[in-house]
Image (cartoon, rainbow, N blue to C red):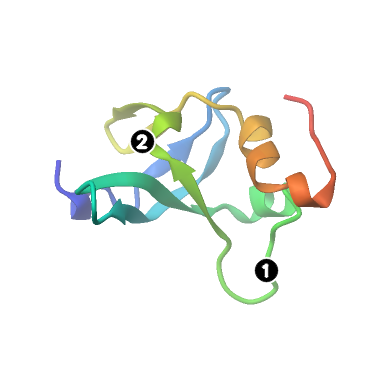
Amino acid sequence: MKVDQARGREVIESKGWKIGRIRDFIFDQEGWKITAIEVELTREIAEEFKLRKRLGKTCIPVGVDHIRAISGDHVVLGSSKGDLFNIFAPSQGQKIEN
């Protein structure tokens, strides 16, 4: 699969919630490999994470180690949205249950 073919695919967390779409890729130039996908969050998920920006899209990097499968037009993560939230919100002192 080419990178351009993966852009725009829906990203689904482990419990079936759509969290967003692939916007781009984070590439390690020294190791010549993709290390993360940049996920453009849905409005609802960004609001739930309290990450929503007033202007523009909210994007988060998700390490490739969180990807469980690529199926059709979907990328399925092995992590729940709660697990992902806890990666990006520790500075806010919040934790959500899965």
The quarter in which the C terminus is drawn is top right
Q: Secondary structure at mark 2?
A: strand
Mark 1 lies on residue: 53
Which label's residue is closer to the chain start, 2 or 1?
1
**Amino acid marked by disc 2:** His
Residue drawn at point x = 76 percent, y = 54 percent? 50
10 Å crowding of disc 2: few (<14), some (14-19), many (20+) = some
- Identified at 69% across, 61% down, the residue is 52
Q: Position of residue 35 (x, y in %)?
A: 35, 44
Position of 6 relative to 40 (above/below): above
Q: Which kind of residue does numbered mark 1 sit on?
A: Lys
Above/below status of 60 relative to 79: below
In this image, 93 relative to 10: left or right? right
Helix, strand or loop under label 1:
loop
Could you say where residue 78 lies in the image, as x and y percent from the top left? 48, 23
Q: Which residue is mark 2?
A: 74
Q: In the rendering, which numbered label is found on residue 90?
A: none
Image x and y of residue 62, in percent? 48, 43
Which residue is more in the foreground, 18 or 60?
A: 60
For marks 2 and 1, give the one nearer the viewer.
1
Q: Residue 54 is drawn in which quadrant?
A: bottom right
Residue 53's spot in the image, x, y percent? 67, 68
Above or below, 70 against 19 in this view is: above
**Circle 1 Cα neighbour tier, 10 Å, few/some/many (<14 / 14–19 / ≥20):** few
The Cα–Cα distance between marks 2 and 1, rounded to whole angstroms, is 25 Å
Q: How many marks?
A: 2
Which residue appears at 64% of the width and 40% of the height? 87
Q: Quadrant of residue 96?
A: top right
Residue placed most toward the observer, 23 or 87? 87
- Residue closer to the observer: 28 or 67: 28
Q: Residue furthest right?
A: 93
